Image: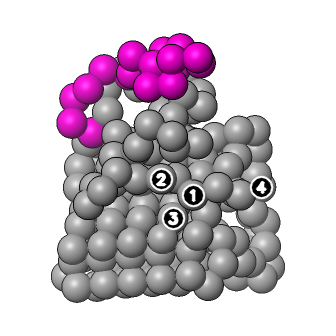
Amino acid sequence: GYVAIGLRSTPVITSSMVVSNTGRGLYLNWTGLRARNCLVADNGGDGIYIIDDNTGPSSWIDYCTIAGNGGAGYNDSGHPLHETTWFTNCIISGNAGYGVQRPASPSRNDYFAYCCVYSNALGDFVGGQISLGSGMITNMPPLFGQNTYDLSTPSPCVDVAIDIGVTNDIVGTLRPTAGRKPAVGSLFDIGCY
């Protein structure tokens, strides 16, 4: 199973867990997505898969953790009429495929800023038109807690996200957290927790 979304809409998914499906986590066709504070993890296929047969609106994925999936973390078919996907403050790690998979010559960019994309089995990025902005972590693991996708205190994802107006995490804890790294202070964390 998976969550399928389609027909030229841009649904909003907030503080949701899309976990342990036998197939893909989220399957988007002819649609955009606004996902915020979501955990997309431990699904049998790709965490998020976008395919378009026609024009689809842009997508915004903020403060999401996409990890431990059986395929790519994010797989974009790169259809020439689909609009841009923007990732901010996300973790894409530990997936069995690529972290971010795109075709070699898509017609438009996907943008990543203040994200941790690391330790995906086939590689972290493959394909064209992938734009990496400020605050990217691509050389260190996110360091999750034991048996959870919450961040551990020494995680490089703690206190390094950018404020984009999201005041709670996936379980309702206020953002920013009270400085898990006291030398840094109370800043925002990357990911859904």
Amino acid marked by disc 1: Pro
**Image position of 106 (left or right of 46):** right
Could you tell me which secondary element the residue under label 3 belongs to? strand
Query: Can you identify the residue that label 2 sits on?
Result: 143
**Image position of 188 (left or right of 132):** left
Callout 3: few (<14), some (14-19), or many (20+) C-alpha neighbours within 10 Å? many
Which SS type dominates the magenta stretch?
A: loop
Query: Can you identify the residue that label 4 sits on?
Result: 131
Query: Can you identify the residue that label 1 sits on?
Result: 141
Could one spot residue 72 in this view of the protein? yes
**Image position of 82 (left or right of 132):** left
Q: What is the CA distance from the residue labelled 1 to the residue labelled 4?
A: 20 Å
Please report contact status of discs 2 and 1: CB closer than 8 Å, yes or no.
yes
Amino acid marked by disc 2: Leu
Please report contact status of discs 1 and 3: CB closer than 8 Å, yes or no.
yes
Query: Which of labels 4 and 3 is toward the front?
Result: 3
Residue beneath the point at 58% across and 42% down = 156
Q: Which mark is residue 47?
A: none
Q: What is the CA distance from the residue labelled 1 to the residue labelled 3?
A: 8 Å
